[in-house]
Image: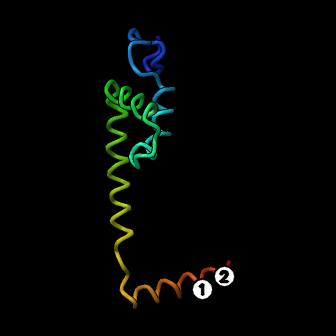
Amino acid sequence: MDAADPSTSPTAGEGPSDLECRECVDLLGDYLEGTLPRAQAELLEWHLDGCAPCVAFLNTYRGTVNAVQQLKRATLPPELRNKLVAFLKSTRDRI
């Protein structure tokens, strides 16, 4: 038995598998946006009920999305924006 391989654990088959976890991660964006079809959302919620690592990942993902949304609302002061644009143009010209 290999402790790093969940398929060889004594409880293999009793909880969510790694494959299910990978599939669930792919659905999180649509789930949080509310665009995931209801049947898939229910299956994801069922998986989350039994998988603490996926719940932790979901919470981190949700926090990251919220943080990025806050960044979108921030505006740069005009002087900083002008310096940034000038820097990016000068960098582009050197490439």
The residue nearer to you, when weighing 75 against 34, is: 34
The residue nearer to you, when weighing 19 against 27, is: 27
Asked whether the residues under the numbered discs 1 and 2 touch, taking CB atoms below 8 Å apart as contact, a structural biologist would say yes
Q: Residues within 10 Å of mark 1 (few under 14, many from 20)?
A: few
Residue found 32% across the figure and 51% down from its top: 63
Image coordinates for residue 30, horizontal then vertical, percent: 46, 45
Image coordinates for residue 26, horizontal then vertical, percent: 50, 39
Image coordinates for residue 27, horizontal then vertical, percent: 47, 39
The three-letter amino acid code for the residue at tag 2 is: Arg
Gap between marks 1 and 2, in whole Å? 7 Å
Relative vertical location of residue 72 with respect to residue 87 in this rendering, above or below: above
Image coordinates for residue 69, horizontal then vertical, percent: 36, 62
The quadrant of the picture occupied by the C terminus is: bottom right
Relative vertical location of residue 27 with respect to residue 71 in this rendering, above or below: above
Instruction: Give the image's coloring scheme.
Output: rainbow
Residue found 31% across the figure and 43% down from its top: 59
Q: Is residue 36 left or right of residue 76?
A: right
The residue nearer to you, when weighing 86 against 59, is: 59
Report which residue position mark 1 lands on.
Answer: 90
Residue 10: quarter of image = top left
Report which residue position mark 2 lands on.
Answer: 94
Residue found 46% across the figure and 88% down from its top: 83
Secondary structure of residue under mark 1? helix
Q: Residues within 10 Å of mark 2 (few under 14, many from 20)?
A: few
Tag shown at residue 22: none
Secondary structure of residue under mark 2? helix
Residue found 50% across the figure and 32% down from its top: 23
